[in-house]
Image: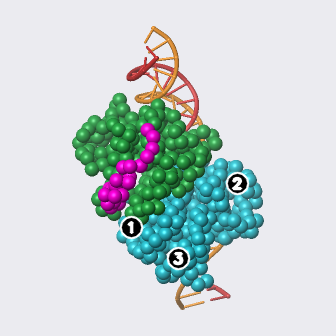
Chain colours: A cyan, B green, C orange, D red
DNA sequence: CGGGACTTTGAGGTAGATCAAAAAGTGTGG
DNA sequence: CCACACTTTTTGATCTACCTCAAAGTCCCG
């Protein structure tokens, strides 16, 4: 796994949504940066900090965190390998949220200057970056609907559906079991539930024969039931070829 | 109020966050489009529809709506005059959410082609559009924290704080009372509460001497108390001069 | 003057929180 | 390989913030 492996993943992600010619592709793959290994659950971007690098997730998962004055935590996004987790920081360098590893993570820090230079030089890349940020916002919007209006069982199911779709994008949902390192506490942080209640909802999902989580592994037994519980429609993820 | 009045507002908004030279500014003001008046509470962009125009709010308020299969509605964003409500549709033309007037609205529909042409021609404008979409996402993220983790009283207070800041941006908070056409039902749709509970929270805010809503008018009596209840920090709105 | 949308208040129910504690897993150092 | 500390999972019992249902009151407009 060379340092450019992350860039390959990111390029693939960008090309899911934007047409890029070979010159643009080569420019992405040539982006400078430095690999950093983050050991479990440490912030690698701190809230309020001014940053001059964007963080590409190479392996592991990362969460975007906010918190209330009372210390309640909210995960507003989960990032998987191939995500440029804070691409938005290129145009808004003050971090409004923290980024933290969910388990061990490897990131590749790319200087804003380099990304900005690409955007200046290539309108197609500028548009691709813009589009990826917009998809990011679409996910936030979907979470708001789910977290605001669906019951707890559906919230948990929905997050699982989303993660399965993203982690297996293009691939088979049948490569079960799937690595799924999120703890119940973290699932609670993402769904605005307590970990106790997440636990009960997971039991319910298991008892309904939909899905099973054990030892950081996820086993989907009945995808269509899970989707029905979650009211899940993957369109908002924009993982398809089209628009 | 000519048709270009909306464009003037939008330019002002863009310049809050991005440096634009006179050529870019002139290009914005020259954007073609057509004025449309929407009578109360009708969708002017429908969920799932493919759009080729972006909607600039000229007067009135508009809401971005999603809903569950059960028909529960969630407002994921409120747009005020000067907002290009679905600028994101320029790079993602399938509308993932509906746009609806909150009361009567006047919009100015600008063809995607025209906006795209500007972004191609001017990297500064491309960046400005990108940045505005990112600020939009920052607001979604903040709503997620607030709606997920704060008690009902704070949720309502927070939405009021945000609207006051945005509607009076740069201006005085002392120009009270402020026009505030949101109904309690709509406040509930935005905060994931029932209108009944919103009503009780507004009473509580009134009894605490923080704020009063009467006849579509808002009167803030104790801004600092309101801010304290809401745990409100306006940084995420990026209305300041800086970053 | 009548009808529709919004606001306000009351009474009672419930989904999910809170509190508490045991069980299971994970890692570290001796 | 075991002992110890720490984190995560699981379960039970209780509590409460907010919802639901219902109805009256108010405002607005034709």
Residue indicated by mark 3: A27
Q: Position of residue A173 (x, y in %)?
A: 73, 64
Q: CA distance from mark 1 to mark 3?
A: 22 Å
Q: Position of residue B184 (x, y in %)?
A: 44, 35
Q: Is residue B171 magenta?
A: no
Q: Secondary structure at mark 2?
A: helix
- Horizontal placement of D23 versus B20: left or right? right
Q: Secondary structure at mark 3?
A: helix
Q: Nearer the viewer, mark 1 or mark 3?
A: 3
Vertical comparison of A181 with A147: above or below: below
Chain under callout 3: A
Q: Position of residue B118 (x, y in %)?
A: 44, 57
Quadrant in the rendering for residue A1: bottom right
Residue nearer the viewer, B210 or B1? B1
Q: Position of residue A48 (x, y in %)?
A: 37, 66
Magenta-drawn segment: B15-35
Look at the numbered discs 3 and 2 and tell me whether their residues touch, using CB distance below 8 Å: no
Look at the numbered discs 1 and 2 and tell me whether their residues touch, using CB distance below 8 Å: no
Q: CA distance from mark 3 to mark 2?
A: 40 Å
Q: Earlier in the sequence, mark 3 or mark 2?
A: 3
Residue indicated by mark 1: A93
Residue indicated by mark 2: A226
The crowd level at tag 3 (other Cα within 10 Å; few <14, some 14-19, many 20+) is some
């Amino acid at each position: 796994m060379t340092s450019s492996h992350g860039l390959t993943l990111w390029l693939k992600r960008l090309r899911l949504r934007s047409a890029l010619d070979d010159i643009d592709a080569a420019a992405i793959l040539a982006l400078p940066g430095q690999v950093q290994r983050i050991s479990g659950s440490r912030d690698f971007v701190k809230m309020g900090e001014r940053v001059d690098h964007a963080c590409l997730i190479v392996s592991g998962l990362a969460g975007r965190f906010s918190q209330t004055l009372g210390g309640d935590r909210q995960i507003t996004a989960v990032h998987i390998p191939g995500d440029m987790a804070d691409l938005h920081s290129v145009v808004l360098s003050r971090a409004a949220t923290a980024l933290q590893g969910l388990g061990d993570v490897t990131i590749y820090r790319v200087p804003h200057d380099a990304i900005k230079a690409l955007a200046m030089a290539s309108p197609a890349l500028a548009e691709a970056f813009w589009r990826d940020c917009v998809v990011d916002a679409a996910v936030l919007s979907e979470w708001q609907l789910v977290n605001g209006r669906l019951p707890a069982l559906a919230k948990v199911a929905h997050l699982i559906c989303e993660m399965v779709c993203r982690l297996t994008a293009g691939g088979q949902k049948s490569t079960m079991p799937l690595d799924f390192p999120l703890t119940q506490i973290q699932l609670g942080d993402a769904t605005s539930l307590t970990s106790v209640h997440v636990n009960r909802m997971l039991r319910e999902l298991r008892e309904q024969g939909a899905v099973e989580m054990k030892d950081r592994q996820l086993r989907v037994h009945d995808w269509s039931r899970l989707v029905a519980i979650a009211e899940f429609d993957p369109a908002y993820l924009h993982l398809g070829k089209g628009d």
